[in-house]
């Protein structure tokens, strides 16, 4: 299959849906939506929504009823980037080659844009505006899964440990905790929620949980590596920041070569988990490979 | 009825449920939960959860199946206070007589504690651990209602306009927008979600929407007035901050007497909306009166 064409088509579908779900508004709160949209449409790859659609496809759904939840995942991801870039956090000026939210709108508005996106994500999830509606009890389970992955048991928990670890001597298990929680949890939830919404059976959902966990960690190790070998222009964010902030990463702990080995192992684990699926899981296969081959 | 006894009993029930829903955890992310709990158990009156329970009671439910959503409303309220107190926002050191989150845990952790509480609120809403479960489609509607009230169409929108208005010459309609959105929307959603979860019919839900809108605005005008006539010790937060920050409030626009008249009218509107209910709406009657009589 042509992965690039697949990713492009899916990205287009998601961008169109996002445009429908979060249009500009008029009135006093227009600036809130403007700030939310600025970061939402700043050129994200839409990896999480694509994984959600691909998870649904793998279990035999056409993906359309999944779109609101898929888009909600992108809102959650975007909120986390905005808050992560704030001066009180990583204090980054550049994201995807553009000035970060607080550089454009000020710190207070960026904070609120993040809050708005996170909240809107849950409003989006309960929208049932697509043909082939999801069963409400399944949707409630998916909301619980995503909230857990985004909250203190997932992304927020990873962020907290990341902050506490800055400048500290941390070991491999802490770095793994940060990676699997800060980035991994939402990536895993993306593919698993797609499978649940597509009415996948228990063994399919379990297999995609393994898949999601593996590519989630591989993705973050790729990020660590890119921070060293990439350049600011290609990355769209300032390269070399991990070292500058003395963040402990996979490469800083075990070196580049060993990090690449670990990555390769993770991708093999992910691919192995797909063996119970038929051809409809082909995109998930390709995405697993793509994640460690990416350059930005 | 004895309102104080009622409020005390309900508060106890809610505090116990909150303790069950957000217990301390061990492991790397323990500090995240510690920070979330610090603000959650800092002596809130639990007005929003109590309104949610009272809304359910008014339509004939015993309130118990409503507890997860009622508690979720308190988590959302608490997150908004933490973010609102941050240096990039109102920069307040004192809340409910205790140092604010960022004073205790630092700015980054306070930001994440807020994010964690907002996310956890939605995880809590989908918990169905109480006898007399809610129907999943109704619960999905309630989640949508609360997310809308908390997001850019409600609380976040009100915050954005509040920030944009600081130091500006704003008119009555802008102040009303801020009040009805920043505080009013979630108060309204609290009582309405209770009625929906308690299987109230359409006219009951509509009546409580009117009730909620009126007491929500009355509540915020009471806040404006207390900022002038209250003292820091009784309020548990620094008095006189509105004037210090040149915030336009009801009293600053129309004076104290006229503000009290508007309040009284709002309470009468709220009470009038309750006329279709029987005795089971007595707590809502008393709460409407209590809101403008409060001293903290």
Image: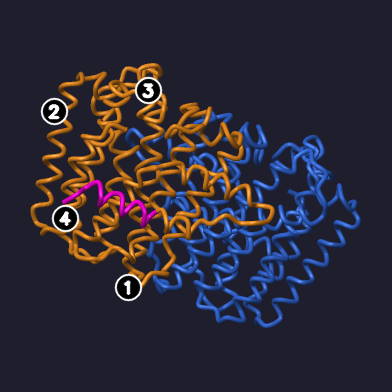
Chain colours: A blue, B orange
Chain-order first, disc 3 or disc 4: 3
Q: Which is nearer the N-term, disc 1 or disc 2?
A: 1
Residue located at (31% from left, 44% from top): B185
x and y percent of residue A27 in the render? 32, 35
- Residues under labels 1 and 3: Cα distance? 44 Å
Residue under numbered circle 4: B281
Q: What range of the chain is rendered magenta?
A: B1-14
The image quadrant that residue B68 belongs to is bottom left
Quadrant location, the C terminus of chain B: top left
Mark 1 or 4 closer to N-term? 1
Could you tell me which secondary element the residue under label 1 belongs to? Answer: loop
Q: Is residue A287 left or right of residue B221?
A: right
Residue B6 painted magenta: yes
- Number of numbered tags placed on the structure image: 4
For the point 57% across and 81% down, the residue is A202
Q: Is residue A111 left or right of residue B289?
A: right
Q: Label 2 near label 1: C-beta < 8 Å? A: no
Q: Chain of mark 1?
A: B
Residue that label 2 marks: B261
Q: Which residue is mark 1?
A: B132
- The chain letter for the residue carrying disc 4 is B
Residue B265, percent from left and from top:
12, 35
| A272 relative to B247, above or below | below
Q: Which residue appears at 24% of the width and 19% of the height?
A: B253
Q: CA distance from mark 2 to mark 3?
A: 22 Å
Say whether marks 2 and 3 touch (CB < 8 Å): no
């Amino acid at each position: 299959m042509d992965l690039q064409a697949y990713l492009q088509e899916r990205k287009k579908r998601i961008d169109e849906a996002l445009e429908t779900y979060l249009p500009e508004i008029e009135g006093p709160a227009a600036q809130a939506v403007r700030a939310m949209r600025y970061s939402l449409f700043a050129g994200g790859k839409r990896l999480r929504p694509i994984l959600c659609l691909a998870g649904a496809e793998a279990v035999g759904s056409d993906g359309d009823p999944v779109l609101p939840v898929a888009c909600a995942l992108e809102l959650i991801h975007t909120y986390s980037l905005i808050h992560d870039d704030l001066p009180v956090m990583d204090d980054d000026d550049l994201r995807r080659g553009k000035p970060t939210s607080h550089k454009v709108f000020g710190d207070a508005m960026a904070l609120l844009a993040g809050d708005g996106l996170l909240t809107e994500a849950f409003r989006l999830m309960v929208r049932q505006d697509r043909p082939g509606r999801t069963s409400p009890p399944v949707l409630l389970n998916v909301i619980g899964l995503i909230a857990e992955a985004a909250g203190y048991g997932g992304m927020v928990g990873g962020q907290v440990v990341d902050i506490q670890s800055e400048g500290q001597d941390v070991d491999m298990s802490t770095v793994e905790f940060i990676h699997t929680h800060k980035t991994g949890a939402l990536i895993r939830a993306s593919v698993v929620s797609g499978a649940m919404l597509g009415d996948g059976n228990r063994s399919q959902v379990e297999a995609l949980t393994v898949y999601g966990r593996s590519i989630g960690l591989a993705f973050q190790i790729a990020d660590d590596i890119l921070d060293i070998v990439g350049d600011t222009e290609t990355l769209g964010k300032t390269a070399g920041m991990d070292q500058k902030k003395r963040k402990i990463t996979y490469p800083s702990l075990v070196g580049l070569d060993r990090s690449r080995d670990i990555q390769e192992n993770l991708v093999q684990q992910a691919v192995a988990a797909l063996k119970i699926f038929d051809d409809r899981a082909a995109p998930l296969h390709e995405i697993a490979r793509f994640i460690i081959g990416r350059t930005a």
